Image (tube, rainbow, N blue to C red):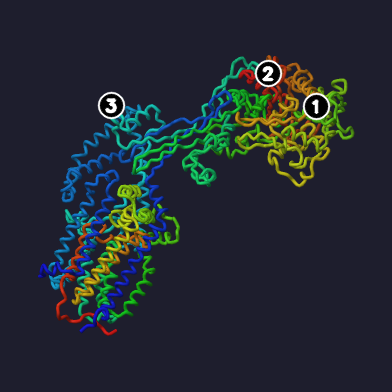
Amino acid sequence: MPAAFPDSMYGRRLLLLVGIILVGMLLPVVAIVRLTVVKGSALRDAAEDNLVSTTWLPTGRGRILDRKGRVLAADRPSFDIAVDYPVLTGQWAFAQAARKARRANKETWKSLSPVAREALIQAELPAFTERLETGWRQLASLTGVTLTELEERRSAVIADVTRQAATVWERQRLVMQRELERGRELLADVSLAEVDNRPIREQTTPHVILRGVDDRVIFEIRSLLSGGKLDGGPALILPGVRIIDTSSREYPFDSTTVTLDRTSFPGPLRSNRPLEVDVSGAAVHLVGWMRTKPFKEDLDRRPRVRTDGTLDRGFYQDTDPVGSFGLEGSGEDELRGLRGLQVEQLDTGGVSIEPPEPGRDVKLTIDAALQARIAALMGKEAALTVVQPWHKNKAAEIGEQLKAAVVVLQIDTGDILAMVSTPTFTREQLRSDPDSIFKNDRDLPLLNRAIARPYPPGSIVKPLMLAAAASDGLVEPDSRIDCTGHLYPGQKDRFRCWIAKPPLSTTHTAVLGHHLDAAEAIMVSCNIFFYTIGQRLGPERIVRWYDAFGCGTSALQPRLGVGDQFFGVAGPQLKSIPSDEEEMVGADLARSPVRPSSEARRGVSPSEATLMGIGQGPVAWTPLHAADAYATLAKYGRRIVPRLRFDAPVTTVDLNLNRAAVTVGLRGLERAVGDELGTGHHIVVEGSRLNREVTFNVAGVHVWGKSGTADSGLKARDSAGNIIKELSGQPASIDHSWFVVLAGPESAGRPTVAVAVIVENGGSGGRVAGPLCNQVLRALQAEGHL
Amino acid sequence: MISLRDTTAAHFGWLCLISGLALSFIGVAAIDIGAAPAESASAASSISPLAFRQLLHLGVGLLAAAVVAAPHLRVLRYLAWPALGICLILLIILLLPFIPSWLVTPRNGVRGWIDLGPIDLQPAELARIAFILAAAEYLRYRKNHRTLIGLLPPAIITFIPVCLIVLQPDLGAALLFIPAIFAMLVAAGARGKHMAAVVIIGALAAPVSFPFLHPYQQQRIIGLIQQFRGQRGGADDINYQAYTAQTVAGSGGLTGYSDAKARAVIRYAQLPERHNDMIFAVILCRWGFLGGMAVIGLYILWLIGAMATAAICKEAFGRLVVVGIAMMLAVQTAVNMAMVLGFLPIVGLTLPFVSYGGSSMVSVWIMTGLVFSVAMRRPPRMTRPAFEFDD
């Protein structure tokens, strides 16, 4: 007899198996406890998240406006129409017919032969084919596109997708073949022939067939799509139609036409025939542009969920355009709106909507029409920045277009009315040939010369130096100085006055017949007078005064948010300057604006301070600095930091300038353009003193101005590369041409605008920048600013 | 033939029948929850077509159970080898390359079904029953399986159908044969050290087999390792199904969601195979921890019924059949649950009685019928002692 259960072997073995089974069942029990009890609440949240469908609703980006409300940048609603690929190919009709046939013959379908099935499908097919054809006709009539055009676009999409599919399938086939050859798959899941039956993604997705469709048409199609019937007509017949929002950024003022009155142009450029100039990209440096997708920095800066756990509706998605440069870039956070959020409870159907908040508009102080006018004046057609024979430019060929920049400031507010830099570039160029902008080392079109290129100030600083020295009690406003042609009579090659150079080889004292007072020194731009001022100020004070006028380390720098800005340097930050005035720093600055050298740390030497008295030596600034400093002078030392946006705070600082000295300085400026002896009074256009033309000729406008011919530090070379010599035998330098004016309506009796003009390598300030400056004043008058 | 009195007498077969029925009805309810769209949840008067079809499957399954329970075990013994032979032929037909695609259509890449018009036959489901019957027939009143060489014939009996099913490829179904034969050998008195050696060799061989797996199978194992490491990698592809199943399952908490809410959660979670391999997640979502425990309790009840039947049974063939079936069903249940709950890689295995599917339902009810058949036949007064050895 067998042993009694469970003492028998069989009994023990059964107990062992029961034990194994129970242990095996324990595993799920533990897992259930872990999932439902331990992690239950978190998983419940995760599962219920699926019950909520959140849809982000698009928002609009704010506009960029000029001071008169003209739209410089705005979103333009734009829509594309896409159609599902199977509808494009007609495969949809076959699929629908097959489905209908299968449903109608549900019971017998499986037993039918493929031929019989095909016959049933074919019987259903015409109705669906007919629907597609009618649908295409309806779409054509809705959109105003001909059926032939639609057909062509369909064919183009199909051809494209077919090509892509062939490539993908070929690749898959090769991969499978390799797998098979390696013997990994005894029986492949899908045979090689079946690869072609696996649709690629593009064969299941919609494709755009109409771009930039009119809003009205989109509205109609939307209402048809949502089942609404228009005028009692049928709903949208074509299946698989989708509307894609492709709103784009438009820059309506980007290209404009300006008519220039040339009757007041200098000599040979004058004409009674107005000149029509197409201006493109006049404000592209300021307005900036968008890039098509965010960088990682953008995604990190505005993640969907902030660190405090709240939702940022302005977060970036992978396809969001982002302001990339200019105001579009710096104003990104204001311009960018907040998306709306639609939350739908899928199980209950409840919907809550947080409406989108469009971005704020950004209003600029710029007058776009003025900007365009000035850009037109600086263009090749107007020829004011093109080298002319009377320019006597040793560094450039006649006919060569020079680079230039203009800044116009409203004195009472610090508003920048215009800021133009040439060469510029167009948006089309940005799209089609970015290398011509970003890799153009010769012209540097991306560089905004009005604010980012360092230039030696040259003689335009003279009235500022007078005010500075007088304010420090180092010079009396009515003091006089004897211009001997050389600061140090024993050293004729150093610290010369410009008038002492051949062919004039004289002194201002000789020309005027008496020692110069300060106003006369400004009028004739006497170097000796201002070397003396520089000497008296000395290194420490002169650096401090440059700083006070906004050039250098001052914290009161206008931060415009339009790309790179050069904040100016005076003294220590610059490379050491040889005491010889002929070795200036402009070119070095241009290459390496703020790189301090070991020598720089020693500070400014007394002879450098002397040079800085005439705006040379270790000092560099930009046209914006020049306009800012002159505006400060016009307000007797009350400086308003320039601004480009109306919402920028107004920052004011008083330099406590000596009023008498400023008055003398302004008188000097007035005489510089108003007195026959003034360096900015006239130009000689045909090389004979008989063809003198007054530089400033704007009726009803009073002008205070100063020319500047700033040594760039580079030597002029001929086409063979040899250094060109002056009459004196000294190498001829390449000079930047400056002109800065304060101007106001005669009725106002005081300046209301400050204009700074620089023409790079232009030569004489009076001959080149002066006439351009005069035309800028005309433009200001034309636009109602004077 | 058996008398009505024997059928209705109290025996452990009833435990299997009742727990099987309870599980089947829970399955129908879960299929309804998983399949019906949320909108129709309020229309409690009707159930989804899928659930209704499952009810039909249950009917067919019960009928099949009755059919196999009716004849004496002796008859089944005679039929065991021919049945296995037929099943093997069907399994081979599945793999023949020239078989027309209207007869054998691969589903998800698996050549596992023969299309017989109104019904689809899954030979692997029938093969596992035939295999248990044949193995039991082979092992009854034998001693040679107590030697190492003697283990070879049962290994071959197992290896042939397993290979054919692996080639389909249906690894999950194939792997069930191994614990079944293991349990039958243990019950039949195979030496402990041999069995231990087999287990150790199997455990060591498992990692070696990794390179021979299909890429998708390798991916699932890698995915599981990622899950164990707590990495969320693959949550959108290889681990998508696993994470979704765990989320749905865990969301049920202690007592589960209301009917409507559970339907919504399951529908919008887009859980793949929710009426089939992943149905246990649906049960946990709807009835929570308590529901899960109840289901496991019902399985344990079924297994206790079967093992008690095997314990009482004096007839060698009956014992082995019940032990093989019990172990196969237990492993299938545990593996399915472990896979849903994220403890094992996802293999295509249904949850017995509960998952949707005709072949699967009929197969488990045939097994239940076999257990019932053994249970309701009282032990003969004189029996030859089986599987009693000295060590």
Q: Secondary structure at mark 1?
A: loop
Point out the frontmost of discs 3 and 2.
Answer: 3
Given residues A489 and A672, the one toward you in this image is A672
Task: Provide the residue designation for mark 2.
Answer: A267
SS for tag 2? Answer: helix
Horizontal and vertical percent position of residue A407: 66, 28
Residue closer to the observer: A510 or B38: B38
Q: Can residue B276 be seen in the rendering of this structure?
A: yes
Counting from the top left corner in percent of width and height, residue A13 is at 28, 77
Q: Residue furthest right?
A: A490
Q: Quadrant of residue A449?
A: top right
> Label 2 neighbourhood size at 10 Å, few (<14), some (14-19), many (20+)?
some
Instruction: Give the amino acid type for the residue marked by disc 1 in the picture.
Output: Asn
Residue at the disc numbered 3: A233
Viewer-proximal residue among B176 and A649: A649
Q: Earlier in the sequence, mark 3 or mark 2?
A: 3
For residue A443, side relative to residue B8 (left or right): right
Q: Earlier in the sequence, mark 2 or mark 1?
A: 2
